[in-house]
Amino acid sequence: MQLKINGKRENLQPCSIADYIQAKGLNTTSLVVEHNQKIIKQDQWDAVRLKDDDTLELLSFVGGG
């Protein structure tokens, strides 16, 4: 299946948002996930299955002074 992730096309095997994040080794502490223009809470990442032509935006917030 093909998804658009942060503006770039990627080919993936069917998986959940949690599976994708784990496979990429992303730090979940400050990660926000938008799936098809809807913010998905972290406790729902396992339940949301990615489908062909979905769009994901992965945003990490960084603090500074």
Image (cartoon, rainbow, N blue to C red):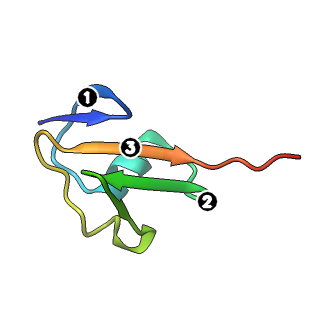
Q: Which amino acid type is shown beneath numbered disc 2? A: Thr
Q: Residue furthest right?
A: 65
Whole-Å distance between the Cαs marked 3 and 2?
16 Å
Relative image position of residue 50 (x, y in whole percent): 19, 51
Identify the mark at residue 29; answer none if there is no mark: 2
Badge 1 crowding class, 10 Å Cα cut-off, few under 14, some 14 to 19, many 20 or more, is few
Q: Residue furthest top?
A: 8
Asked which secondary structure carries label 1, the reply is strand
Q: Which amino acid type is shown beneath numbered disc 1? A: Glu
Task: Specify whether 1 is left or right of 8.
Answer: left
Closer to viewer: mark 3 or mark 2: 3
Which residue is pictured at 61% across the width and 59% down the height? 29
The tag earlier along the polypeptide, 3 or 2, is 2
Near-viewer residue (62 or 15): 62
Relative image position of residue 19 (x, y in whole percent): 33, 53
The residue that disc 1 covers is 10
Which residue is pictured at 36% across the width and 58% down the height? 18
Relative image position of residue 22 (x, y in whole percent): 43, 50
Which residue is pictured at 44% across the width and 68% down the height? 42
Res 8 quadrant in image: top left
Asked which secondary structure carries label 3, the reply is strand
Asked which secondary structure carries label 2, the reply is loop
The residue that disc 3 covers is 57
Identify the mark at residue 60; answer none if there is no mark: none
Marks 2 and 1 close (CB-CB < 8 Å): no
